Image: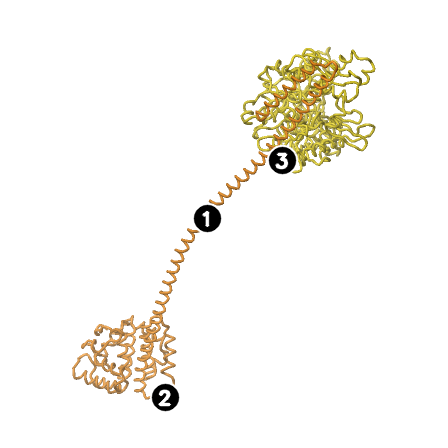
């Protein structure tokens, strides 16, 4: 079965299929991708370019009975489209079905084997629920999602795959950081990636919908209209038809491109309004254009700088900037990025409108698996962590599931709950030190017997990652038989592009001595232990059960001694433990660690 | 048997008279026996003639003629048996000869009650412990003891003589079972009616002749059987040789066939690999053709779509140009700008088409 790449983009959608050493994008009759727009007119469903032509605004989402970029609606159960409640899955399925039928009817002599299996590109921010809904939509459109791949990774892999020798390209770029700027008609998506020993890892993502190419066109159109109509009478200004607006929008886009290689250009729309001299005519130059959209482009570049700043990566540390998307064809955009990175580090994709779909198709053809970028862990007592899924674990494809089971013990059941915190290191790779910052993925608890002794109650934890890349964790206590579940939708992934090389080591980037959780974080002290070991039990509780444990000759851990003494008033002055005025217990050091909140 | 010179056996295993040494004490008997075996004379006459010849020639080691005559008159079988046993002796069966001599000597003792020198010598010669033991074993085997021990029992004596004969025959046959021969010859020559209807002398003669005939017949039978066996063996050998030749030929043919098969296999293998290679190349060519067709059609569609887009844009420019010219007054600047843009686009299109992009 031929698995094709399916770019269900914000602005446009496209199918690409491999044919030998080339990738064939299945464009529509205009030679362009299909707009991701659907309109509902009564019983009629209009999809693609006809629906796009009905739109006169660049914004994403709902426009009356027209839906642009319906994938962003997948978070909702139902949406109101022109007064009709519709399922987002059905709306998406309408677009997907149209794209599929268009691909199957392509005049290009290529065998798609019915176009049943696809590798689908998704935005980095797309959650697990949305992925699951998207899978359903594809199923309704007659396609099975074999694998999801994030759009910037697909674009980058497509860019690398276009090299004469992939292995050489990968070797030359090993240990390098690459910024993928997907500047399309609707959005600007930025992803800082790192290629580390055959793994394309996303380090940080950012994006905006305010500087998309369509916005720029509309901004030019509106200014042209404003300036041109300043001399017009009021009736004339109000008598502009929607068709005239569309013609002006096309003229504005042409002017935007034309001003890339000429100093001045006349925007001319004949018969823009009714009347003998209803032409729209406005002479604009490059300065005018810069004044109109320069801020938007600068905003896009600022987004790039902000992303790098947040990732603590300097501009010189970026080895390559790959510019793709429709705006890559705009010289001023490329010029701005070249100003930032220098001309040699900016690569502009020649196939910028098709690169993501082609990258996904290459991923399908080469069988490159999606892997987990960062460890998924559960925090245990004493600031230790149990690894549920490791960085580099291959993610399941359609119909598969990755399962891990663990047996844990409740080290402190006094409050009747075993507390779970699923977390992940902030850096990708393995061998992340225990004391490095963690990002909390989810928290949940399961009831336990509060009268039981520590370690008496066992907790069975089953964690799995499904085909939609959602992590499910279910904990069951052995005595109480309570069960609690949680789902994590925002795991981070990488693309394995090497030949089975070991996942990157997180230690390469340097170890920061820090608390695993940042200041101000809500911290849940875990009361779980991987094995019955008294060192996991809080000192005050252990003292009640085993006073002999704290005998001086037993050399109990200092932290447990401190915990025991914290809740014990001073035996001499009666003040609470560690009271500032108490000088009686100088032999006992003051606790310096944060205690349970 | 030290006092007896043993004549060399003839080709048929029977010593002839001429071959018998003159010193042989039984030399006259040989002639007598030869005559008896030829059947020309009565045994009594022969015995007498032999005795007379022995007396005339004065052979000192022979029994006196009176003894011989008496022997011949009383019991020619003894002489005959003696002669037969001598033959066995000459045939290289000393044990059988000794046994016969022992029996003969005992018979003489029993009949005459006294021994002359020769008899005594003969008796002495058979008194070795080894000889006695062997004869006892043979006698026990061939002759029932009650009969053998009865003095004057001629039939028992006959049977003993017959036993010796059987020993002789056995010596010839080597591989035959004595019991089989005993049963056969006893049934044939010593049935009750034969014993009752023939006088003793005749019976003795008959015995001699029949025994000899039996010997001859047996020998002939043996010879015939041997010949047949030999012939069979030769035939089998020939067949075996033929089969071996055939097998060799077949083996050679097999080797040749195997070689041919190997060659064929190699050729088939070569052709298989060639076919595989051809198949692979065909599939590769098909795949390449499909890819090329796909690439070509993709390029064509891409070119068609791009050209269409460019033509649409040019049409739009032309439309704007015409509109600008249609205005009153004509908007020459815009028309000129559009014309220039149109010209640039056309030039770019031509360049792209010429470059094959």
Element at badge 3?
Answer: loop
Name the residue carrying label 2. Answer: B196
Tint of chain A: yellow
Could you say where residue B42 lies in the image, as x and y percent from the top left? 26, 87
Q: Residues within 10 Å of mark 2 (few under 14, many from 20)?
A: few
Q: Is residue A366 visible?
A: no
Could you confirm whether marks 1 and 2 are on the same chain?
Answer: yes
Q: Residues within 10 Å of mark 3 (few under 14, many from 20)?
A: many
Pick the front one: A514 or A32: A32
Q: Chain of mark 1?
A: B
Element at badge 1?
Answer: helix
Element at badge 2?
Answer: helix
Position of A534 compared to B224: left or right?
right
Pick the front one: A134 or A101: A101
Could you say where residue A101 lies in the image, as x and y percent from the top left? 70, 34
Tell me the tag on residue B265. Answer: 1
Name the residue carrying label 3. Answer: A110
The Cα–Cα distance between marks 1 and 2, rounded to whole angstroms, is: 87 Å
Q: Quadrant of residue A74?
A: top right
Q: Which chain is orange?
A: B
Could you say where residue B132 lies in the image, as x and y percent from the top left? 30, 73
Q: Earlier in the sequence, mark 1 or mark 2?
A: 2
Q: Chain of mark 3?
A: A
Could you say where residue A154 lies in the image, as x and y percent from the top left? 63, 27
Q: Chain of mark 2?
A: B
The Cα–Cα distance between marks 3 and 1, rounded to whole angstroms, is: 41 Å
Q: Quadrant of residue B80?
A: bottom left
Q: Is residue B18 visible?
A: yes
Pick the front one: A211 or B74: A211
Residue B156, relative to residue B269: is it above or below?
A: below
């Amino acid at each position: 079965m031929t698995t094709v790449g399916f770019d269900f983009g914000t602005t446009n959608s496209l199918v690409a299929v491999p044919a030998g050493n080339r990738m064939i994008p299945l464009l529509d009759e205009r030679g362009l991708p299909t707009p991701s727009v659907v309109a509902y007119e009564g019983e009629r469903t209009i999809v693609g370019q006809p629906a796009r032509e009905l739109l006169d605004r660049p914004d994403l989402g709902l426009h009356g009975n027209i839906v642009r970029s319906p994938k962003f609606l997948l978070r909702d159960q139902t949406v109101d489209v022109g007064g009709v409640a519709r399922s987002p899955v059905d709306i998406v399925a309408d677009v997907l079905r149209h794209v599929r039928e268009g691909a199957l009817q392509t005049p290009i002599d290529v065998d798609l084997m019915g176009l049943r299996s696809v590798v689908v590109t998704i935005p980095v921010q797309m959650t697990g629920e949305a992925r699951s809904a998207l899978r359903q939509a594809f199923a309704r459109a007659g396609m099975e999602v074999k694998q999801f791949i994030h759009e910037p990774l697909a674009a980058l892999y497509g860019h690398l795959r276009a090299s004469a020798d992939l292995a050489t390209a990968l070797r030359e770029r090993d240990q390098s950081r690459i910024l993928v700027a997907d500047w399309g008609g609707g959005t600007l998506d930025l992803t800082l990636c790192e290629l580390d020993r055959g793994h394309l890892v996303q380090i940080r993502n950012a994006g905006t919908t305010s500087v998309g190419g369509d916005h720029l066109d509309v901004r030019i159109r509106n200014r042209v209209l404003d300036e041109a109509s300043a001399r017009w009478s009021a009736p004339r200004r109000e008598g502009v038809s929607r068709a005239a607006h569309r013609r002006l929008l096309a003229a504005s886009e042409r002017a935007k491109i034309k001003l890339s290689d000429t100093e001045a250009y006349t925007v001319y729309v004949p018969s823009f309004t009714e009347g003998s001299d209803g032409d729209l005519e406005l002479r604009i130059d490059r300065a005018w254009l810069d004044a109109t959209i320069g801020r938007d482009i600068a905003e896009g570049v600022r987004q790039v700088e902000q992303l790098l700043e947040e990732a603590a990566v300097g501009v010189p540390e970026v080895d390559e900037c790959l510019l793709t998307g429709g705006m890559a064809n705009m010289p001023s955009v490329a010029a701005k990025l070249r100003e930032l990175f220098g001309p040699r580090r900016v690569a502009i994709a020649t196939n910028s409108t098709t690169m993501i779909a082609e990258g996904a198709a290459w991923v399908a053809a080469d069988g490159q698996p999606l892997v987990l970028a960062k460890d998924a862990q559960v925090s245990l007592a004493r600031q230790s962590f149990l690894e549920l899924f490791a960085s580099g674990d291959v993610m399941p494809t359609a119909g598969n599931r990755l399962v891990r089971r663990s047996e844990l013990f409740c080290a402190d059941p006094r409050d009747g709950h075993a507390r779970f915190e699923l977390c992940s290191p902030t850096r990708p790779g393995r061998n992340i030190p225990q004391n490095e910052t963690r990002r909390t993925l989810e928290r949940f608890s399961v009831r336990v017997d509060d009268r039981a002794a520590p370690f008496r109650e066992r907790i069975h934890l089953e964690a799995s990652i499904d085909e939609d890349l959602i992590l499910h964790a279910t904990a069951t206590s052995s005595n109480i038989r309570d069960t609690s579940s949680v789902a994590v939708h925002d795991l981070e992934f990488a693309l394995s592009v090497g030949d089975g090389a070991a996942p990157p080591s997180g230690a390469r980037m340097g170890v920061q001595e820090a608390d695993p959780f940042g200041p101000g974080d809500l911290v849940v002290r875990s009361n779980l232990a991987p094995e019955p070991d008294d060192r996991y039990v809080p000192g005050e509780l252990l003292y009640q059960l085993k006073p002999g444990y704290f005998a001086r000759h037993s050399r109990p851990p200092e932290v447990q001694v401190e915990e025991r003494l914290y809740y014990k008033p001073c035996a001499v002055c009666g003040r609470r433990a560690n009271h500032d005025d108490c000088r009686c217990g100088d032999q006992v050091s003051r606790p310096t660690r944060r205690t349970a909140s | 048997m030290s006092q007896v010179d043993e004549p060399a056996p003839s080709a048929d295993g029977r010593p002839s008279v001429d071959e018998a040494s003159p010193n042989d004490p039984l030399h006259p008997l040989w002639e007598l026996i030869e005559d008896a075996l030829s059947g020309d004379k009565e045994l009594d006459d022969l015995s007498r003639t032999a005795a007379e010849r022995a007396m005339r020639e004065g052979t000192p080691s022979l029994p006196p003629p009176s003894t011989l005559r008496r022997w011949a008159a009383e019991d020619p079988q003894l002489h005959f048996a003696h002669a037969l046993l001598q033959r066995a002796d000459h045939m290289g069966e000393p044990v059988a000869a000794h046994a016969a001599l022992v029996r003969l000597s005992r018979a003489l003792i029993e009949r005459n009650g006294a021994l002359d020198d020769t008899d005594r010598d003969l008796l002495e010669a058979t008194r070795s412990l080894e000889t006695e033991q062997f004869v006892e074993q043979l006698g026990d085997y061939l002759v029932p003891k009650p009969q053998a021990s009865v003095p004057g029992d001629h039939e028992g004596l006959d049977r003993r003589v017959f036993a010796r004969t059987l020993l002789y025959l056995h010596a010839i046959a080597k591989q035959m079972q004595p019991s089989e021969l005993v049963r056969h010859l006893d049934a044939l020559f010593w049935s009750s009616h034969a014993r009752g209807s023939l006088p003793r002398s005749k019976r003795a003669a008959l015995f001699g002749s029949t025994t000899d005939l039996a010997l001859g017949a047996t020998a002939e039978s043996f010879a015939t059987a041997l010949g047949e066996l030999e012939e069979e063996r030769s035939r089998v050998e020939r067949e075996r040789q033929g089969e071996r030749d055939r097998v060799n030929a077949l083996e050679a043919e097999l080797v040749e066939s195997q070689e041919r098969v190997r060659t064929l296999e190699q050729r088939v293998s070569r052709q298989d690999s060639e076919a595989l290679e051809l198949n692979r190349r065909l599939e590769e060519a098909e795949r390449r053709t499909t890819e090329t067709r796909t690439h070509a059609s993709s390029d064509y569609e891409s070119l068609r779509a791009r050209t269409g887009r460019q033509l649409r844009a040019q049409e739009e420019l032309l439309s704007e140009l015409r509109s600008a010219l249609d205005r009153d007054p004509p908007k020459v600047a815009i028309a000129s700008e559009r014309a220039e843009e149109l010209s640039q686009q056309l030039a770019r299109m031509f360049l792209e088409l010429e470059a094959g992009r």
